[in-house]
Structure formats: C-alpha cells, structure tokens
Image (tube, rainbow, N blue to C red):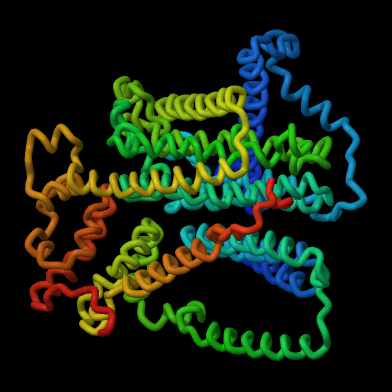
C-alpha cells in the first residue's frame, strides 16, 4: 500500500505513516467488531437461555444495533473518579487492559497468510501478550481505592497466574505435535478434512482441547470463573468504581479477549481456517491456482475462522448462563489439582504417541515398522536427502530433534548441517556433540 | 537523505521510553507507580527485541519480566501497603552509593558495547566481503526459524555453528546449552518443590485436654 501511495507522488514518510495507520485501523475495527458482536451475542443467547427474546427493536430486527446504543449510553454517563483513587493509575488501567488484548490481534492469523505480523513464535507471543491484560485489571482494582475492587484484583491475580500454567502446557502440546510456534504453519498443517484437525489427532489431544477450553474460560474471567467481578458478592469486583467510558474499555477488552482465546483454540485444535470439508481446495481455490482464486479461498477460510471463533464465544456464553460460580478454592483446585496433572499426563501421552505412532493408529497397524524408523517416516518427505548412516551414529539429542513433525524446516536445517555432521561422524569423533567441557 | 530510516525512528522512540521510565522508577516515590514504570520500561525493552527481529526473546521478556513484575507488584502491595514503605524515602548516602554503582555498571556496559566489533557499523563489513555475505545468509536463515534454532541450541545442537566445518575448534563448541538448560530445569524443580513444601497446610496437633470449641474456627 505504501508503494501505491508513493507511486501517486505522496512523500515517502507520509505514505508509510498512512499505510501503517490504515492497517492499525483495520485491526482495531476487527477487534471492536468482535467485541460488539460478542456483546450482542451475549444479550441474545442469555435471553434465549432464560426464555426471553432479548433486544428486538434497536436497528429494526434482531436488535443488531444494540451494542452501539449501549456504547452511546455509556459514553453519556458521568465519569466518576473516587477521591481515594490513585488518579493516574485509575485512568490508565482500562487502556492497558484493552491495548494488551488489541496487541494480540497483531499476531492472530485469520486465513492462510492473512495476519498482520507473521511471527515465528506466534503462539508464545499470543500467550505472553494476552497475559498482560490482567495487569490492567489488577492496576484498576488497586487504584480504585475500594476494598471490593482490591478483592477482585487479588482474585484475578491468583486465578489468572495459576491458570497460565495449564494454558501454556496446552499450547506446548500442539507445538510438540507441529514442531513450530508459527500460527500460520500450525493452521496449514491441519489442512484437509476435519480428521486432520489436532483435536482428532489422538485421544490425548482430544482431552487437552477440553482442558484448554476450561483454562481459556478461566483466563478470560468468564463464569463460572468470574470471581474477579462476582456481582453477587463483590458488588462488581475490580469494576466497582468504574463507570462510563472507562468501563466500556474493560468490557471491550473482555469480549475481544474472548474472541482471541476462541480463535487461538480454533487455530490450535480445530483446524484454524480449514473447514471440516476442504471446500476451497476441492473447488480449486488454493494459492497455487492463482492470486484471485487464492484470495477467494482465503476469504472462505477467514469466514471459517471467524465462524469458529464465534462458535467458541457462544459456547462460553452458554457456559456462563448455565453454570453457577465456583468458589475461589474450587477455582484453584480445578487448576492445580486437575488441569495441571491432566495436561501433564496428556503431554507425556502425546509425546509417546507421536514417537510410536507418528502416522496414526491405522498406519501403525497396517505397516508395522521398526521403532526409530517409524518415528522417522513422517518427518521426511524425501527420504534420500537424509543421511541415515551418519544419522544413526550421532547421539540421541539429534534424534529427538528429528522427531519434530514439520518436515520442511527440519529438512532445510538438515541440508544445511549435513556436511558438518557427516564429516564429524566420519572423522570418528563418535558423534559426541554434547560434550560441554571441551 | 530522502527516505526515513523507520528502524532508527522506532529504536529511538522505544529506547527513549525505556530510559525515561527507568529514570521514573527511581524518581517516583509511590511503590505501585514505581512498579508500573518498571513494567513500561521492560515492555519497551521487549519492543526493542521485537524491532531487532528477536521475537522469541521479546515474548519471553514480556512473559517473564513484565508478568513477573506484576507478581512483584502484588506482593509489594500486599506486604508493605500498611508499613512505612508505601512511599520510599531514600537517604543521601544511599543516593551516592546507588550513583556510584550505577555509573560503574554503565561504564562497563559502554565499554563492552563500543568494543564489540560487529556493532561498529560498516567498518566490520568492509574488511571482508565474503563473510559479510555469509553473515547475511545466516541472518536470513535465523529469521526464518529463530525459535527452532533456539530450541535446538537448548537441546545441545548449535545449528549456527554446525556448518562451519572448516574450523574444528568451533565444531567442538557446537555443544549448545544442554548442560545449562538441564541445570536450570533441575534448579527450578527444586524451587517449585521447596515452595510447595513451605506453603503446605500444616496439620495442627490438637491438644486433647482443651475440648472447648475454638472460638476462631467456624
């Protein structure tokens, strides 16, 4: 886009600035739209669950203009800052909350290659930045100068810090399966029919997905884990002293983070932008078929991804209006006594599965291969390019490295390292790469 | 110069934020605001890492330091909020001591930074064109899969050194960071177990003579 602007004789600095601003605006629009649709969804779904109709009149039908109306109402509200509050921190806390969630959208791919910044460590970045959201919450709770707010903030801290552990482990399981932290690549590896999705990869990942769901609900402060803003016990938790526009920011942050965790779940376990049936590739809409077709295919993929993310949000809303709130000790017990051990066991299970049955159960039964060879088969698409003889003489750490599933990166790394390994092995150094003391 | 070097622009911006808030940590008295300034400073450093293309390091910085400071903040508030430490009062002697240490550290870092030949701009590239090209190759490869290389390094394979087969001395140093990684892992496990041990709920041995209900227990 910057090139386009430069071509119509815009100054260089202006062109780049405009291009950057447009892209930021696009992302912001996505984040805000996801929040607005989430709020509307919450109203409608909760109403249906309670046998009501929910908003019906605003905007003609279905009450689809309800979120903007809500926003307008909240902006018109009086902006109150308590006397006991720490004014600066009280003011910046909502923005921190929203900014952290917004930054996550930077690394969230919506379709194959449709991502603002394609990061190598995308999954890790997402976890790290999404974890910053609670900083705003804790700051807001502390700065409000109210005991209800402080209680809410402390609960939030205890809850989110402990749920980050199983959440991270769930992501690690997928990273082990795919061998990459690049979210675009993780999505692409699940292309094809729905049984290629990671949730159906093996029984362990199926369990891990449900642990992920639990942790995702907890980390976005939704009921049954909404202790930080437990309305019936803490007034409104960390939101007690907030009103008007600042309150809106907290809520937009919450709904946007719901979208983010649902989207991350879809990316990691539910195939990302790949639908259950590979319509795009059946119709010939892959990037290989030309730019335009690829673009249309990506558009379909984006619809898929957004549909999955909103399905996840609907599920969270459904949970919220169905389940009662847990006590704080139950919350921590769920995390530390159930989620962490389960996901650790599943992590070990996934490792063993991908070591012994890398091609899946059926492949292993029909073609019983020798133990290290079978672990191999899946990684190398070109078996000849691998130096088997040199390979088997090197030490075990290298073999572990070969376990990683993404053949492309591995192969490239190997091709680069090949002469070194070969010469090293042939020189008769017993392939001892591990000797630290030399 | 026609085009703006955006890299330098953002570097200066982020560096200014990092330094400014680092100074603010020292100047501001209130402990919570201090922690906030520290968080902003550390986040700006993470931004510098992202700018340099070290995404993994940047994300780790965000997760470990920024997240860790948050825990520090919570405990700082919880443990000291009622004490005299809410607003720090620092005496003159402490100022002098801190200044001496700070200036000494700064001098060491400055010396290290200026003496690194690779950082001295185009001079290093002029010396030999071929290594420079190789270096660029390395850079491109590193950008492709930096996290993977990092992981291999922790498993004991220094991928960046593997293809320097012409120097056997360097090949010997291919060993990576497996030992350090293992030591740190074991250390962390010990810390975790120790924390769990210290934080466990101790069962009180009830005195059998006092049958009267304890007023404190529900």
Front residue of B169/B180: it is: B180
Q: Is residue A283 above or below residue A173?
A: above
Query: For this view, does A127 lie left or right of residue A427?
Result: right
x, y percent for residue B177: 34, 72
x, y percent for residue A263: 50, 35
Which residue lies at the image location 13% right of the left edge and 54% below the top edge?
A385
Among the 4 quarters of the image, the one containing residue B63: bottom right
x, y percent for residue A11: 66, 51
Q: Residue furthest right?
A: A83
Query: For this view, does A127 lie left or right of residue A408?
Result: right
Q: Is residue B197 above or below residue A367?
A: below
Quarter of the figure that contains the N terminus of chain B = bottom right
x, y percent for residue B216: 72, 52
Quarter of the figure that contains the C terminus of chain B = top right
Q: Is residue A111 above or below residue A176?
A: above
Question: Can residue B10 be spotted in the picture?
Answer: no
Which residue lies at the image location 88% right of the left edge and 30% below the top edge?
A76
Query: For this view, does A90 lie left or right of residue B67?
Result: right
Q: Residue furthest front?
A: B209
Which residue lies at the image location 63% right of the left edge and 85% below the top edge?
B106
Q: Is residue A306 above or below residue B77?
A: above
Question: Can residue B195 be spotted in the picture?
Answer: yes
């Amino acid at each position: 886009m910057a090139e386009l602007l430069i071509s119509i004789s815009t100054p260089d600095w202006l062109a780049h600035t405009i291009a950057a601003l447009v892209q930021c605006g696009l992302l912001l629009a996505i984040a805000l739209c996801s929040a607005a649709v989430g709020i509307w969804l919450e109203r409608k779904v909760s109403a249906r669950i309670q046998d009501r109709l929910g908003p019906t009149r605003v905007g003609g039908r279905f009450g689809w203009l309800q979120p903007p109306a809500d926003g307008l109402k909240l902006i018109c509200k009086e902006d109150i800052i308590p006397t006991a509050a720490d004014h600066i921190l009280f003011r910046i806390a909502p923005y921190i909350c929203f900014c952290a969630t917004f930054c996550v959208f930077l690394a969230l791919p919506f379709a194959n290659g449709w991502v603002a910044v394609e990061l190598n460590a995308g999954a890790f970045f997402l976890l790290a930045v999404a974890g910053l959201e609670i900083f705003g919450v804790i700051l807001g709770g502390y700065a409000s100068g109210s005991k209800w707010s402080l209680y809410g903030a402390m609960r939030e801290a205890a809850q989110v810090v402990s749920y980050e552990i199983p959440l991270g482990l769930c992501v690690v399981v997928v990273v082990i399966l795919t061998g990459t932290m690049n979210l675009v690549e993780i999505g692409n590896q699940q292309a094809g029919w729905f049984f290629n999705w990671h949730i159906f990869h093996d029984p362990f990942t199926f369990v891990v997905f449900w642990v992920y769901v639990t942790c995702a609900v907890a980390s976005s402060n939704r009921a049954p884990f909404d202790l930080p803003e437990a309305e019936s016990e803490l007034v409104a938790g960390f939101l007690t002293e907030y009103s008007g526009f600042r309150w809106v920011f907290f809520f937009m942050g919450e709904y946007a983070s719901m979208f983010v965790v649902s989207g991350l779940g879809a990316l990691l376990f539910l195939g990302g932008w790949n639908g259950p049936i590979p319509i795009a590739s059946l119709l010939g809409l892959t990037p290989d078929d030309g730019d335009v077709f690829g673009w249309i295919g990506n558009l379909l993929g984006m619809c898929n991804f957004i549909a999955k993310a909103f399905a996840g949000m609907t599920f969270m809303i459904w949970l919220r209006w169905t389940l009662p709130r847990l006590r704080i000790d139950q919350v921590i017990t769920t995390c530390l006594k159930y989620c962490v051990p389960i996901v650790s066991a599943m992590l070990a299970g996934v490792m063993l599965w991908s070591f012994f049955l890398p091609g899946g159960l059926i492949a292993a039964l029909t073609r019983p291969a020798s133990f290290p060879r079978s672990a191999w088969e899946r990684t190398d698409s070109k078996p000849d390019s691998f130096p088997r003889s040199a390979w088997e003489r090197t030490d075990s750490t290298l073999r572990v490295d070969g376990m990683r599933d993404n053949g492309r990166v591995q192969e490239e790394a190997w091709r680069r390292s090949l002469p070194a390994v070969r010469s090293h092995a042939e020189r008769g150094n017993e392939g001892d790469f591990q000797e630290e003391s030399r | 110069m026609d085009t703006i070097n955006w890299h330098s622009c953002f570097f200066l911006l982020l560096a200014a934020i990092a330094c400014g808030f680092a100074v603010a940590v020292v100047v501001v008295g209130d402990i919570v605001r201090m922690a906030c300034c520290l968080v902003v400073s550390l986040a700006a450093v993470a931004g510098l890492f992202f700018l340099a293309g070290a995404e993994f390091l940047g994300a780790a910085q965000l997760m470990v330091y920024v997240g860790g400071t948050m825990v520090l903040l919570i405990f700082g508030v919880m443990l000291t909020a009622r004490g005299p430490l809410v607003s720090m009062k620092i005496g003159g002697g402490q100022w002098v001591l801190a200044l001496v240490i700070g200036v000494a550290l700064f001098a060491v870092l400055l010396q290290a930074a200026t003496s690194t030949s690779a950082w001295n701009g185009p001079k290093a590239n002029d010396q030999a064109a071929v290594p420079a090209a190789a270096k660029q190759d390395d850079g491109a490869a590193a950008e492709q899969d930096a996290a993977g290389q990092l992981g291999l390094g922790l498993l004991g394979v220094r991928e960046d050194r593997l293809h320097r087969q012409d120097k056997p001395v360097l090949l010997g140093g291919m060993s990576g960071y497996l030992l350090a990684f293992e030591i740190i892992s074991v250390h962390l496990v010990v810390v975790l177990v120790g924390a769990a041990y210290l934080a466990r709920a101790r069962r009180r041995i009830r005195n059998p003579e006092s049958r009267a209900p304890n007023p404190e227990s529900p």
